[in-house]
Amino acid sequence: MEIPKKIYFKLRPLILPIKTIIKFIPKNASILDLGCGKGILSNHIRDFESYTGVDLNIELNDPKEKITFIKDNCINFINKDLSSFNTFILIDLLHHLNEKEQILLLSKLIESTKSEDLIIIKDINPRNIIFSFWNNMHDLLISKQKPNYFKFSLFERKLNLEIIKIAGFHERIFLYDHYFFILKKKVNSKRMLQKI
Ligand SMILES: C[S@@+](CC[C@H](N)C(=O)[O-])C[C@H]1O[C@@H](n2cnc3c(N)ncnc32)[C@H](O)[C@@H]1O
């Protein structure tokens, strides 16, 4: 179901904890927003250096100052030189990817980031069966896809010591359990996952 951008921008903040997301974005941020959708984040941020949104399905409008949109698959885009960005944001992207793509994307991202870069992940992570059922219905209706909830705790156990977890917490809005997972790279590291 395609919702017009104007209506989407009014409705989306009712279920998206946008204020909490913004709290984590530093003032000097050069943002890469992966799976940016209609670019709602770019509508709410102030005091940033630059914003680049990447999405498979995006309407490319006239470029605005400091704001760029790119139509691409994040799995491909992540192979490019990302050194000009310092803040990487994934809002409700992971549950649209399969498990292999989720790990591939995050591994590549952590490998490519520089020391002190920030990775802000916010994804749906239902904490009970009713919320899970509701979210499945939501995604089937809106994206015609069953969500693949990301296994945050499993992933966290595999992170090596060079990645600092800044925060990991839930925020509930109506029937949506949002999970925040904020990471920072301590030193430049080529290897993200410990050998299993
Ligand atoms: C639930 S929407 C979230 C959009 C936006 N982040 C927001 O919060 O409004 C998920 C978005 O991920 C995009 N997406 C899914 N898989 C993708 C991929 N492999 N590469 C790029 N974008 C993808 C979809 O097109 C969709 O716009």
Image (cartoon, rainbow, N blue to C red):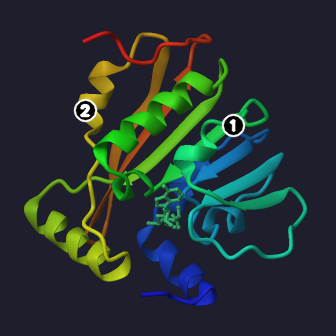
State the residue at coordinates (67%, 21%). Answer: 114
Q: Looking at the image, tell me whether mark 1 or mark 2 is earlier in sequence order.
A: 1
Q: Is residue 136 above or below residue 148?
A: below
Question: Does the rendering let one see residue 48?
Answer: no
Q: Secondary structure at mark 2?
A: helix
Q: Is the CB atom of the residue marked by disc 1 within 8 angstroms of ligand 1's nearest atom?
A: no
Quadrant of the image occupied by residue 88: top right
Q: Residues within 10 Å of mark 1 (few under 14, many from 20)?
A: few
SS class, disc 1: loop
Instruction: Tell me if I can see residue 186 in this picture.
Output: yes
Q: Residue at x 53, y 41 (%)?
A: 120
Amino acid found under the numbered disc labelled 1? Lys
From the image, tell me which residue sits under label 2: 153
Between 196 and 134, the one nearer to me in the picture:
196
Residue bearing the label numbered 1: 80
Disc ID at residue 132 = none
Q: What is the quadrant of residue 56 in the picture?
A: bottom right
Q: Percent from the top left, x then y, of residue 60? A: 74, 73
Give the alpha-carbon distance from disc 1 to disc 2, as whole Å: 28 Å
- Looking at the picture, does residue 5 appear above or below residue 192? below
Is residue 164 left or right of 32 when viewed as pictured?
left
